[in-house]
C-alpha cells in the first residue's frame, strides 16, 4: 500500500510541479485559464449593474474555481516530501490566501459581517500572483532580486538617512508660524515625495534658499530611481549570461527547486532523487 501511495504521489507531483510533461502542461494551462477567469470575475463583481444581473452565476463560478484551487492546494501539500516547505513558501501563502475569502464568506455570512466579507473577497485578487508560475522569466527576476538584496538594502538605508537629513534641514530653513513645514516628520514627508519625483505639491518651499535645496533634491531623485534599477539590471544581465538551455522544468519533491539539468537524476540543491 505504501508503495502504491508513493507511486501515486510521484505521479501527482509530476503533473502539478512538472511543466516538461504533457500532463503537466495540460494542468498548467487549465490552472492558468481558471486564474484569469477568477480575476475577471472579481473585476466584474465590482460593477454593480453587471453583478445585479449575473451575480448568482458569478457566485456559482467562484465556488467551482475555489473548489478546484482547494483540491490543487491539498494535492500540492500531499505530493511533496516536506509540506511545510511549500506551505510557508511565497506561492504556498498566495495559494492559501486566494481560496480563504470564499470560505470566510460562507462561515461569516450575515449583515453584521458584510463589510468584512466584502473586504476579504478582494483578497482573491492575490491569485494574480499565481500567474508568475507560468512566466519563464519570473524565476530569473526573483533570483536577480535576491542576488541584489544586500546592495538594495544598503541603498535604501542610505536613502532613509538622506531624507531625514534633508527633512530636518528644510524644517530649519522653512519652519515658521505660517509655513507648511510645521514639523520635522512633515518635512521628511516632503523630502520623500520630492526625492522620489512624485511631487504632490501639497507642501512647497517659499524662500529662495528652500527652493534651491528643493532643486538639488529633485536632481538627486533621478539617482534614487536609477541606482536600484541599475543594480537589478546588472544581476539580470549576469543571469542571462548563464546557459539556461540545458535546464529542465523538473521540480524537486523536497526543496521544490526546479533549475536542474535535463539529464539530472538528483537535485543539486538538496540531493533528493528527481
Image: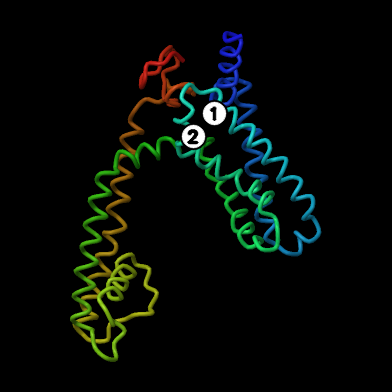
Q: Which mark is residue 77?
A: 1
Label 1 neighbour load within 10 Å: few <14, some 14-19, many 20+: some
Secondary structure beneath disc 2?
A: helix
Q: Residue at x 69, y 40 (%)?
A: 65
Q: How is the image coloured?
A: rainbow
- Labels in figure, total: 2
Q: Are marks 1 and 2 in contact (CB under 8 Å)?
A: yes
Q: Position of residue 52 (x, y in %)?
A: 78, 61
Q: CA distance from mark 1 to mark 2?
A: 7 Å
Per the image, the residue denoted by label 2 is 87
Secondary structure beneath disc 1?
A: helix
Comparing 8 with 232, the one in front is 8
Q: Residue at x 24, y 53 (%)?
A: 155
Residue 72's quadrant in the figure? Answer: top right
Q: Is residue 199 above or below residue 125?
A: below
Q: Position of residue 2 (x, y in %)?
A: 57, 10
Amino acid at each position: 500500500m505504501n508503495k502504491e501511495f508513493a507511486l501515486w504521489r510521484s505521479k501527482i507531483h509530476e503533473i502539478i510541479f512538472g511543466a516538461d510533461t504533457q500532463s503537466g502542461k495540460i494542468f498548467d494551462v487549465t490552472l492558468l485559464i481558471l486564474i484569469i477567469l477568477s480575476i475577471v470575475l472579481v473585476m466584474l463583481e465590482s460593477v454593480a449593474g453587471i453583478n445585479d444581473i449575473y451575480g448568482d452565476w458569478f457566485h456559482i463560478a467562484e465556488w467551482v474555481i475555489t473548489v478546484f484551487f482547494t483540491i490543487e492546494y491539498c494535492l500540492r501539500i500531499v505530493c511533496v516530501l516536506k509540506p511545510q516547505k511549500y506551505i510557508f513558501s511565497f506561492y504556498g501563502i498566495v495559494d492559501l490566501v486566494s481560496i480563504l475569502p470564499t470560505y470566510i464568506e460562507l462561515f461569516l455570512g450575515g449583515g453584521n459581517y458584510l463589510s468584512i466579507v466584502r473586504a476579504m473577497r478582494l483578497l482573491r485578487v492575490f491569485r494574480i500572483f499565481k500567474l508568475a508560475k507560468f512566466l519563464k522569466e519570473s524565476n530569473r527576476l526573483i533570483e536577480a532580486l535576491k542576488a541584489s538584496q544586500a546592495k538594495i538594502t544598503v541603498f535604501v538605508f542610505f536613502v532613509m538617512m538622506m531624507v531625514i537629513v534633508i527633512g530636518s534641514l528644510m524644517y530649519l530653513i522653512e519652519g515658521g508660524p505660517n509655513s507648511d513645514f510645521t514639523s520635522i516628520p512633515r518635512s521628511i514627508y516632503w523630502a520623500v515625495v520630492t526625492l522620489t519625483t512624485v511631487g504632490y505639491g501639497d507642501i512647497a518651499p517659499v524662500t529662495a534658499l528652500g527652493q534651491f535645496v528643493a532643486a538639488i533634491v529633485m536632481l538627486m531623485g533621478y539617482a534614487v530611481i536609477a541606482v536600484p534599477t541599475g543594480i537589478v539590471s546588472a544581476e539580470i544581465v549576469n543571469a542571462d549570461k548563464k546557459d539556461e538551455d540545458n535546464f529542465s522544468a523538473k521540480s524537486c519533491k523536497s526543496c521544490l527547486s526546479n533549475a536542474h539539468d535535463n539529464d539530472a537524476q538528483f537535485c543539486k540543491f538538496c540531493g533528493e532523487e528527481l
